[in-house]
Image (cartoon, rainbow, N blue to C red):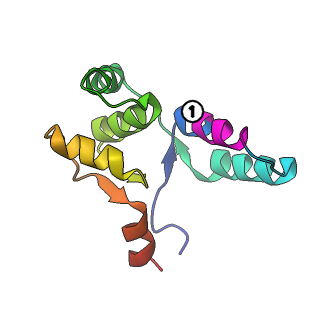
């Protein structure tokens, strides 16, 4: 299935991964292999000023997780599908009238592409 899709990441994704790993026991070699795979196989995208401002606006509207907002806003500004497992984020964005057409919910994504 190689070549059917492009996958993107930001440094915020890596920051979030490291933050979660820092709370559990992990295998350093496995983490290194995963991070290397991300760096080699995914395309890095950097948020634009418009994306940063959008995330800040949404944070001011009441959503606490700035990292998730930065990831969403980056996807939105570059028109890249955004894969998430965070139903609270989706519900918040829907309630705010934001474009959720770019969002792919993780469970639906897995079911669709199994």
In percent of width and height, residue 76 lies at 29, 40
Q: Is residue 97 above or below residue 2?
A: above
Q: Is residue 48 above or below residue 41?
A: above
Q: Is residue 61 above or below residue 83?
A: above
Residue at far bottom of view: 114
Q: Is residue 75 above or below residue 109?
A: above
Span highlighted in magenta in the image? 15-23
Which residue occupies 16% across, 37% down?
A: 96
In percent of width and height, residue 99 lies at 19, 44
Which of the two residues, 64 or 16, is positioned nearer the viewer here? 64
In percent of width and height, residue 18 lies at 68, 38
Residue position for label 1: 11
Which of the two residues, 7 or 89, is positioned nearer the viewer here? 89
Q: Is residue 18 magenta?
A: yes
Q: Is residue 59 visible?
A: yes
| 97 relative to 62 in the view: left or right | left
Which residue occupies 29% across, 22% down?
A: 50
Q: Main secondary structure of the magenta part?
A: helix
């Amino acid at each position: 299935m190689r070549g059917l899709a492009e996958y993107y990441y930001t440094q915020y994704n890596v920051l979030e991964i490291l933050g979660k790993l820092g709370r559990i026991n992990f295998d350093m070699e496995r983490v290194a292999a995963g991070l290397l795979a991300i760096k080699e196989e995914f395309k890095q995208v950097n948020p634009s000023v418009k994306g940063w401002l959008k995330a800040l606006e949404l944070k001011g509207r009441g959503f606490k997780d700035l990292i998730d907002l930065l990831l969403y806003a980056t996807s939105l500004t570059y028109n890249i599908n955004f894969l998430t497992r965070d139903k609270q984020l989706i519900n918040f964005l829907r309630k705010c009238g934001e474009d959720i057409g770019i969002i792919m919910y993780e469970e639906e994504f897995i079911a669709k592409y199994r």
